[in-house]
Image: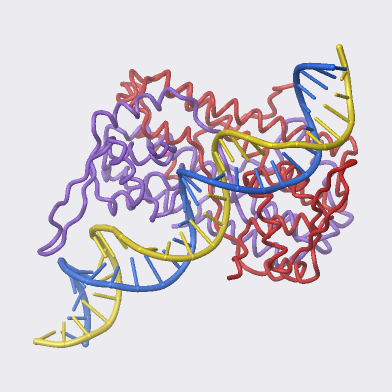
Chain colours: A purple, B red, C yellow, D blue
Amino acid sequence: MAPRMTTSSYAVLGLLALRPWSAYDLAQQAERSLRFAWPKSERHLYTEPKKLVDLGYATVKEEPAGPTRTRKMYDITDSGREALREWSKTPPAPPAFEAETMVRLLFAEHGTIDDLTDALAKLKTDTEELHSWSLSIIEGYDSGDIPFPDRLHLAVLLATFQIELFTLIERWSDYAIAQANQWQDTTTPGTADRTPEIIRILTSHQTVLNQQGPKPHHA
Amino acid sequence: MAPRMTTSSYAVLGLLALRPWSAYDLAQQAERSLRFAWPKSERHLYTEPKKLVDLGYATVKEEPAGPTRTRKMYDITDSGREALREWSKTPPAPPAFEAETMVRLLFAEHGTIDDLTDALAKLKTDTEELHSWSLSIIEGYDSGDIPFPDRLHLAVLLATFQIELFTLIERWSDYAIAQANQWQDTTTPGTADRTPEIIRILTSHQTVLNQQGPKPHHA
DNA sequence: AGTATCGTACTGAAGTATTCAGTAGAGTCA
DNA sequence: TGACTCTACTGAATACTTCAGTACGATACT
C-alpha cells in the first residue's frame, strides 16, 4: 500500500525542492528552518525521504563522501513538484501548542510553590535559549549569511512570528511566577488573588500582560 | 516490561486526582482543559488509563450505565498521587508550537499568492474559533459554571496565556496577509519589500506587530 | 605519531501516539 | 417509529519518537 503524504512529507519535499540533500543534511536544515514551525525528530528525517522515493516524488543517488564512504543524495522529481503545487491549494490543519509546564501549572497542587516556579522558570530559560538561537540566525541574515536569498522574505515573515511568540512566553512566565509567588500554597491563591478581576478582563477582550517596549537582554 | 510514564500519562493521572472518570469522561474533560496545553487524540485517552492501572497508579471498576450497559470508572491510587508529587519536582520539557500554515509560508513558491493568503486566513479563522471556544469557557467561570472552584486560579492563569497566544496569532495572520498581498508573486517580494528593515527591528529586540488595544470582535 | 574529540552519515528495535473505521446501546424530539 | 445525537468504547494500520549503536573522517593537541 502507498503510504500517505503527511505534512511532514510535504515539509521534506519542500526542502528537496530547494536543492538535493542527503538525509543528514535534511536533518540539519530542518533543525534550522522547520524547528519552530513543524518540529520533527532527527530520526524521522531519515525515514521520510525513503517514502518520497517510493511514491515517485524523489530520487536517491549514492555519492562519494570521503575515500571509502558514500552518502545518499535525494532529489525532487517533477511529480514531486506537482504534488507540492496541489498541496498548496488544500486547507492547512489548525495550529497546536504544547508545553509540559502548562500541565504542571494545571496540576500544581501535587507539588510546592517552588516546584511550580521552577517549572515556570524552566519554560522561560528554554524559551530564551530558543529565542537567542533564532535571533542568531536572523543576525546571520543581516550580515549576509543567507542560504537562499530569494526566500528571505518568507523566512523573515515566519521569524517575525517566532520572535513575538518567544517574547510572549517570556513575558507570561514572568507574570505567572509573580502570581505563583503571591499564593500561600499551590491550592490556596490567598486573599490578594485577582482571579475574578482577570476573568472580567479576559472576557472583555482586554490584555492582562503589559506590553513592554524594547528591552535589552541577552548578549 | 513496564511502559514508561510520559507527560500524557501524568496529564491523565492529574485528571484522575480530581475525581474518578470513565475514559469517555476523560476524553471530554481533556478536550476542555488540556486541549491548548497538551493536545492528545481522543483515542489516546482510552489507552492511557489502562496503562496507569498496569502500573498500579489507578484502579478500574465496572459500573452500570443504563439498563444493560456498563462503563469503566478509573480512580487514582495513593501510589499514583505519589507519582504526581515526584513528577512535580522534575524539569519539564521545552515548549513546542506547530502550524501547517507556517510550512505553507516557508514553501509558498509552489502555489499562488491566493493559495498563501487562503492558508493564512485559515490559520486566522481556526484560531478565532479556538479563541471564542476558550472565551466561552471563561465566561462560564464568570457566571458560576466552575467544575473545580479551588483550582480556578490555575485555570485562569493558563487561560491568560492561551488568550494572549490566540491574539498574537490573529494579529500576525493579518500582518502576514497584508505583507503577502504586497508581493508580486510568491517568489518576488517586490520593490516595496521591507525585509531588510524588519531584520534590523527583530535583531534589536523591537516588536514588528503593533500592539493594538481592546478590539471588539466575535459575539 | 598517537589519540582524543567532534562532525558526518546513518540503521534497528521498541515503544508511543494518531487516524480511521466500526460497533452498539441510550436518550430525545418530531 | 424513525432519525439523530450522545454515550462508551475497540481494532488495525500507520506515523512518529526514543534510544542505542555503528563506523568513517577531519582537526587539534600533546
**Camera-side residue of B5 and A203:** B5
The percent coordinates of residue C29 (x first, y second) are: 88, 18
Q: Vertically, is A72 above or below B102?
A: below
Quadrant of res B182: top left
Number of numbered labels in the structure image: 0
Q: Is residue A92 left or right of residue A207?
A: left
Quadrant of res A51: top left
The percent coordinates of residue B98 (x first, y second) are: 51, 42
The percent coordinates of residue B183 (x first, y second) are: 36, 20
**Camera-side residue of A56 and B216:** A56
**Camera-side residue of B7 and A101:** B7
Q: Vertically, is A103 above or below B123?
A: below
* Quadrant of the frame with the N terminus of chain A: top left
Q: Is residue B64 left or right of residue C8?
A: right
* Quadrant of the frame with the C terminus of chain A: bottom left
Q: Residue at x 69, y 50 (%)?
A: B46
Q: Vertically, is B103 above or below B153?
A: above
Q: Residue at x 49, y 30 (%)?
A: A92
Q: Residue at x 32, y 40 (%)?
A: A52
**Camera-side residue of A186 and B58:** B58
Q: Vertically, is A173 above or below A79?
A: below
The percent coordinates of residue A89 (x first, y second) are: 42, 22
